[in-house]
Every structure is written in C-alpha cells, then in structure tokens.
Amino acid sequence: MKNTIALLFFSAILIVGCDNVLDSSSDGVSGEWLIPKDQIFDGGPGKDGIPALQNPELLSISSISYLNDNDLVIIIRFGNTIKVYPHAILDWHEIINDGIDNHKFAITYCPLTGSATAWNRILNGTETTFGVSGLLYNSNLIPYDRATNSNWSQMEVQSVNGSLIGTEAETYSIIETTWKTLKALYPAASVVSTNTGISRNYGSYPYGDYRTNHNSLLFPVSTNDERLDAKLRVLGIVDGSDAIAHQISSFGNENFISNETINGKQIVVIGNSDKNFAAAFYRNVSDGKQLVFTPLQNMLPIVMEDNEGNKWDFFGRAVEGSRTGEELDSPKAFIAYWFAWAAFYPNTSIANN
C-alpha cells in the first residue's frame, strides 16, 4: 500500500491544503523548535480558527440523541465523577478544556491522526487553557497554551516551542470506547452536548472518507511505514527509545491481557476489539511489588485480576481486594492511526505481527 497525499475539501472553516506549508522564516515557526521547521504545515483555519471549547455543557446519557452506538467517545474519571467527550464533538473542536473537582484538564483529539490525550492544565502552578494553533507536524495537532503561548506537539506529549520548550505534558488516564459500551457501563455519566455556542453539524463527520481511506493523507509525514494500513488504529506505547504498537483489531472479542516488557520495564496491555478499547499500565506498584495479571471476562469495567487476587478496571484502578483504591501508573501510551504513530516513533515494534 502506497500512501498518497490527497487534497480534500471540507466546510469553509476546515479548509486545509498542502499549499499552506510554512517556510522556516514564517512568523508561525519563528524561534527555536524541537521539531523540523520545514515539516510544520499551516492547516488553513489559522490560530483558534478551530475553536477549542471551555467548560462545555454536559447532559445525561438519556438526553443525548446525536450519537450512534458505534461512535467513539473518550472517557475520563476522577473519583465517582465520569465525563464523556465524543469524537463527534472533538472532530470539530480538537480541544476541550474542562475539569473535575480540583483536576483541571484538556482533552486533546486530532482527527487527522486519530489520537487522543488528556493533559493537566496546571503549568508551573498556573491554571491555563489550551487552544488550536492551526499548525501541524506529521499531520498532528499542535496545541498552544494560553499562559505562555508555547506550542506543544500532541503526539510527542511535550512543548516544542516557546518558553516551556522541552516540558513534558502531565497526562491523565482516559479510555476510548464506543457509545454503546459507555452507555452500558456508566449510565450515570455526563456527556458533552451539542449546545456548544458554536454552529457546527455535529451529526456529520467533516473529513469525508478520511477515516477509512488508507491512501488519503492531507499532509506529508516524516516516515512512511507500510507494515500496517495507514488508518489502522493502534495502541502505541513508548518508554525511552523503545516503542510498541498493538493493533486494536487484533485483541479479539474477549478481554485481552498481555504482561510484557518495554525498555526494561514491566507493563500490562489490556484491550478488547469488540468493545473497542485499549490501555497500558506499569506492573510495579507503590510498595515495590511487581504484579502479574490475567484477564477477567463479562465483568466490565473490571478487566483483570492480579496474582494477589485483586481485581482492576480498565482505568488501572483496583476495585476489589486488598489494594482497593490503588491506581497503576501509565507509560506514555495512546491510540492513534498507524501512519501517524510510525511517523513519530519509527522504531516501533508491532506486537503479534
């Protein structure tokens, strides 16, 4: 399969094109950057042309009518509070600044790379919000923070320009799954409504057949890795110089568990193709012990049991047993399209390939 750069036309606010390449002398890429300036592209709408949301309205599941069962959603949880951010909203806004209690976070989602992360909005003790810079690297969203105007690479999970250059984003665990699965597991969750104050057709995907057309990319990427189809969704995991990718479609229709090693560190990978979720956690816990996990079926959101008899959910939280309330730490791991993951992490090993 050979990727080609296709020029697609969307709604007026989302027009993008390869003629919007920035040269290194452009104001948009001035100063020091940790990514190649000649590989940064102008997406077209300009800074904040794709409007991030701030503290959006959330409604009960029963009040939401714009989602179909197979639509993907992003779930974040703190304590007993669960909030849900549908791709159908993020396709048009890319960043949602929100919070739960004292946890202030930004849900970032890039529809061109299929990648979602949750970042702490407290930077050096100051609460800020993130916006969409309008710039792209390897087709991926470059957010900026409004406290310092520093630019960040979403998939590198760090600031790549500005006074915070080199600062890693503090991330929070999220789960991506289908609307159907979310409704069954968390009927009391709150979901972002379409009442955003901005007129968008949230029932329509704005990028045509982009999600499924493996030969369609909008912008060049630094590495073209054809080991997998371009738009195949993978759980990518990186630690130091090592990176692993698990294909979401390879997990099977029961809960999958893999105890494995990355960069000399022990991790557990969880996933389910039918429920369309995946995550990774370190297996060493706070008391220094290293746990070994086995899968549990038909108990979602509980997905695994450790060798001590504790049961854990797919957020990496112990919910039964002597470790109840403990949480597993996470490596840098998130779901993305294969072409994008391979462009950022070209030395990636593909699990079970």
Image (spheres, grey):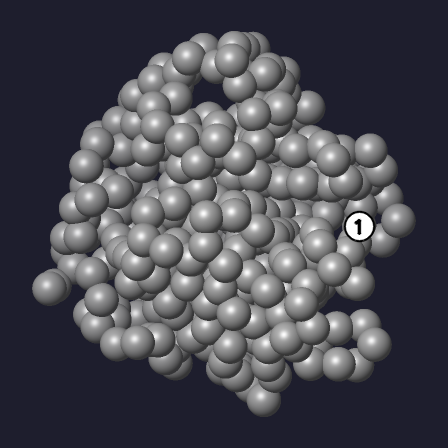
At horizontal 56% and vertical 25% (from top left) the residue drawn is 187
Q: Residue at horizontal 62%, vertical 24%?
A: 188
- In the rendering, at what x and y percent does residue 156 appear? 54, 63
Q: Name the image quarter holding residue 39.
A: bottom left
- The answer to whether residue 102 is visible is yes
Q: Residue furthest bottom?
A: 264
Q: Which residue does the image show at 35% across and 75% down from the upper left?
A: 351
Q: Nearer the viewer, residue 179 or 194?
A: 179
x 59%, y 15%: residue: 59
Q: Is residue 238 above or below residue 180?
A: below
The location of residue 199, given as percent across then percent down, is 45, 11
Image-quadrant location for residue 332: bottom right
Disc 1 residue crowd, few under 14, some 14–19, many 20+, Cα 10 Å = some
Q: Of 31 and 102, which appears nearest the observer?
A: 102
- Between residue 127 and residue 190, name the one nearer to us: 190
Q: Residue furthest left?
A: 1
Eyeballing the image, is 32 above or below 195?
A: below
- Quick one: quadrant of the N terminus? bottom left
Q: Amino acid at mark 1?
A: Leu
Q: Quadrant of residue 256?
A: bottom left
